[in-house]
Every structure is written in structure tokens, then in C-alpha cells.
Amino acid sequence: MSKTVVIADDSKFLTKHIQQFFEESMGFTVVGIGHDGVEAVDLYKQFKPDLITLDITMPNKDGQDALREIITEFPQAKVVMMSAVRGETMIACIKDGASAFIEKPLKFADADFAETFKETINEVFE
């Protein structure tokens, strides 16, 4: 049985690439795609996926607030933040319960990046 993932990013272009990578390169089943933090939390509650990815900068509710809300209700949730936002925000997300942080830009065409991405996701489940 493949692992399930919800992807939340306000870029429709990016969600398509993330979905493709999870499905084709990692064998995951994408059960939901959200484009803001509100949708992300709703999709997590609906599907209770093995993993959720959150962008930080999203409309209506940012990824950091969505992370806190998900972790508060589901402390075992595996949440991977994917963002170009670094520094204090990145550290705060890890403190708030994020399992990992993947820095944008996401360069799936780059073999080294793709391998590191896979390793990061696999480490979340170890």
C-alpha cells in the first residue's frame, strides 16, 4: 500500500510538479491538493494522510499557522515545509513540529536535488 500525501502550495504550477514527483519517483498517492492554509488543514482532517507538505507563504492562512493547527490536533502528523522562506521562520516551523524543511526552488530536474528530496522524505518516516 503506497503512502498518501496532501500537497499545499499556492502555486498551481508547483503543485503539479510536486505531485508528479511524489507519484512517479516515490510511489506515493496524492490524495489532496490545497492552495492555501485553510484548504491544507481541511484536507489533512479529511484524509489524515501519511504526510502533508506545506508552503509557508500562502493566502488566507499561511503554512506556519496551518502547521500549528494540524500539529495541535494531530501531534503525530508528518509535516514537511517547502519554502523559500529561511532563517527564523524555518527554525520556528521545526520547533512548532515540522518533520523536515525543504528549501525552494524545487529543482526536480537536478539529480542531486531529487535524491536529497527523496532522502529527506524517507527520513521523515524513519
Image: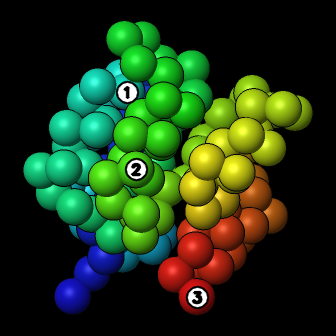
Judging depth in this view, the residue of 87 and 119 nearest the camera is 87
Q: Is residue 106 visible?
A: no
Quarter of the view holding residue 116: bottom right
Q: Secondary structure at mark 2?
A: helix
Residue located 48% across and 41% down the image: 68
Instruction: Classify mark 2: residues with Cα within 10 Å, few (<14), some (14-19) or many (20+).
Output: few
Q: Position of residue 98 (x, y in %)?
A: 59, 54
Judging depth in this view, the residue of 11 and 65 nearest the camera is 65
Q: Is residue 18 left or right of residue 116?
A: left
Q: Position of residue 8 (x, y in %)?
A: 39, 36
Distance from the alpha carbon under mark 2 to that under mark 1? 15 Å
Q: Quadrant of the N terminus?
A: bottom left
Distance from the alpha carbon under mark 3 to that under mark 2? 22 Å
Q: Which label number is shown at residue 126?
A: 3
Tell me the amino acid under the disc marked 3.
Answer: Glu
Instruction: Classify mark 1: residues with Cα within 10 Å, few (<14), some (14-19) or many (20+).
Output: many
Q: Earlier in the sequence, mark 3 or mark 2?
A: 2
Tell me the amino acid under the disc marked 2.
Answer: Thr
Q: Is residue 3 left or right of residue 32?
A: right
CB contact under 8 Å: marks 3 and 2: no
